Image (tube, helix red, strand yellow):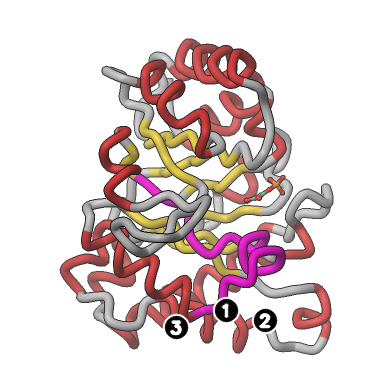
Amino acid sequence: MARTAFVAGNWKMNLGRWEARDLATAVLDGVRGVRGVEIALAPSTIWLSEIAQVVHGSSVTLAAQTMHHAENGAYTGETSPLMLVDIGCKNVILGHSERRQFFGETDDIVNQKVLSALGHDLAPILCVGESLDEREAGRTNTKVDGQIRAGLRGVRAEDMASVTIAYEPIWAIGTGRTASPEQAQEVHAQIRSLLRALYSQEISESVRLQYGGSVKPDNIADLYAQPDIDGALVGGASLKPESFVAIVEACGTR
Ligand code: PEP
């Protein structure tokens, strides 16, 4: 089954207001004419409305980097799915390893957020991945399997068309160390077989799986050439328009 490539840029807690606007504008200019790839930009929450104006009317979608599961309430500092939809978000990154590591997001919390996102027409990008210790101990598959089973608990088959899974080995995020295409493919293939077991052959073949972890213009082609890698979740290289556009181009056609 042909899957449309999907590349998302996670800007994390970077860029001032005008830098963010300029970056989004340059990305839009750069990707004009690229076909066959969906593109999402995830600025920090405070710039979502700013970037919503820039991408409005284009095919580039707006993504949030996280959200609270509740619609409203006494959750100081948080942003609700209703607010994200209101501002024009189509996607939300959930369970990023930095959220898990620095903000205490457990698999159960991530699952609540995934269910809430789907309930509000936000398409989640569910992030999973092992630490270096886990990889070296041979626990990569167990870790990733567990995160996916927990993250997708209660997600109905009919909602899986909206779900993207990003495999991001923690040891490759922001380190300049990328999983080899073979290492990444092996985990992606395992994720697909888990989706087959949890749902169906059809769903396992249609869900998009992104790779993330020091993706750059010079390694994306080999990663994207793998049969089960459908695009990328890009951190550092999404902060420079030329490198992000080159990554998008490698997953699409002009
Ligand atoms: C990320 O944080 O999702 C990521 C993949 O970062 P980087 O590309 O900088 O490794």
Camera-side residue of 5 and 173: 173
Cα separation, mark 1 vs mark 3, equals 10 Å
The N terminus sits in image quarter: bottom left
Measuring from the top left, give residue 93's x and y in whole percent: 47, 53
Amino acid on which disc 3 is placed: Ala
Closer to the eye: label 3 or 2: 3
Query: Which image quadrant for residue 23?
Result: top right
Amino acid type of the residue tagged 1 in the rendering:
Val
For label 2, the residue is 140
User: Visible in this render: residue 182?
Assistant: no
Sequence-first tag of 3 and 2:
2
* Residue located at (65% from left, 19% from top): 242
Going by the picture, which residue comes out furthest to the left? Answer: 158
Between label 1 and label 3, give the one nearer the viewer. 3
- Marks 2 and 1, how far apart in space? 6 Å
* Disc 2 and disc 1 in contact, CB within 8 angstroms: yes
- The type of residue carrying mark 2 is Thr
Q: Is residue 196 visible?
A: yes
Residue 105 falls within the magenta-colored stretch: yes
Q: Give yes or no for residue 6 being in the magenta stretch.
A: no
Task: Report the front residue among 112 and 125.
Answer: 112
Q: Position of residue 28 (x, y in %)?
A: 45, 16
Q: Residue shown at 32%/66% (left/top)?
A: 205
Which residue is at 44% across, 83% downward?
A: 150
Q: Residue furthest front?
A: 74
Residue at 70% across, 42% down: 219
Q: Point out the stretch of residues depicted in magenta.
A: 91-107
Q: Residues within 10 Å of mark 3 (few under 14, many from 20)?
A: some
Residue at mark 3: 150
Mark 1 = which residue? Answer: 144
